[in-house]
Image (cartoon, grey):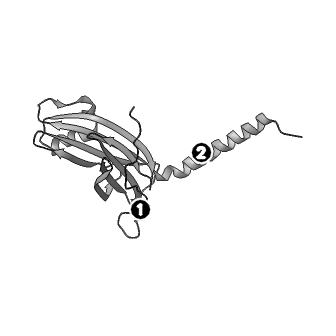
Amino acid sequence: MRPSTAGLMIAALLALTASREARAQGDAGNSVDVRVQCVLATKTHKGMDANLAATPIGHRLEAIFDYTTYRLIKRAEEHTTFGRAVAFNLPGDRILHVAPMAMDRNMIVMDVVLFEGAHSIMRMQLKLPNRGALILVGPRDPREAYITTIAPQTVGLEIPQEPLENDGPAPAADLPSKPLPAAPEQ
């Protein structure tokens, strides 16, 4: 007796769904959300815009910098896994790559690369606390500056974990030397 085509299609669909759910559960411990915010800071005495004031980083900016106006230009969030870079378009035709590489206790080991056009203008490896933020400033002059915050957060990961063997950043050999295309603007 031959099984019906509809029955085979339903069985294949159920198998595919189960496979995706199992993969998602397996990746849950390796998942990282990366949030990037771009702010234009100026000395125009207009205060902080409401979108930025509602974020934890808003008040920190006022405490760190001496600008009088902070305007959120862009906010983006990407989901990735350890070892996989995500790209963000920044003002000034710059592209930011962020690659969470591993966990070391409560620290996320990351590789960050900033491109201007096709040229890498900054690359650094660092450890950042889970749910912490890295603040990049530039270009900067006395009247204004672009401030970019990078805030990674693990998803479904129990910590602390064992430290990395060499207690240093993981190699980032798989990161491209040219910019990845960023997600389309929404």
Q: Within the image, what quadrant is residue 62 found in?
A: top left
Q: Position of residue 86 (x, y in %)?
A: 40, 47
Residue in the foreground of this view, choosing between 123 and 56: 123
Identify the residue shown where x is 40% and y is 44%. Answer: 181
Residue in the foreground of this view, choosing between 122 and 168: 122
Specify the label residue 88 is tagged with: none
Crowd rating for badge 1 (residues with CA inside 10 Å; few <14, some 14–19, many 20+): few
- Classify residue 63 as left or right of residue 162: left
- Which structural element holds mark 2? helix
Crowd rating for badge 2 (residues with CA inside 10 Å; few <14, some 14–19, many 20+): few
Disc 2 residue type (three-letter):
Glu
In this rendering, the label closer to the viewer, 1 or 2 = 1
- Which structural element holds mark 1? loop
Residue in the foreground of this view, choosing between 104 and 179: 179
Label located before the other in sequence (1 or 2): 2
Specify the label residue 21 is tagged with: 2
- Classify residue 24 as left or right of residue 15: left
Q: Position of residue 171 (x, y in %)?
A: 39, 64
Residue in the foreground of this view, choosing between 90 and 63: 90
Identify the residue shown where x is 33% and y is 54%. Answer: 112
What is the distance, in whole Å, between disc 1 and disc 2 at their CAs?
Answer: 30 Å
**Residue 65 in view, yes or no:** yes
**Residue 82 in view, yes or no:** no
Q: Residue furthest front?
A: 118
Q: Position of residue 7 (x, y in %)?
A: 77, 36
Q: How many marks?
A: 2
Disc 1 residue type (three-letter):
Ala
Position of the C terminus by quadrant: top left
Specify the label residue 173 is tagged with: 1
**Position above or below: 84 against 42:** below
Position of the N terminus by quadrant: top right
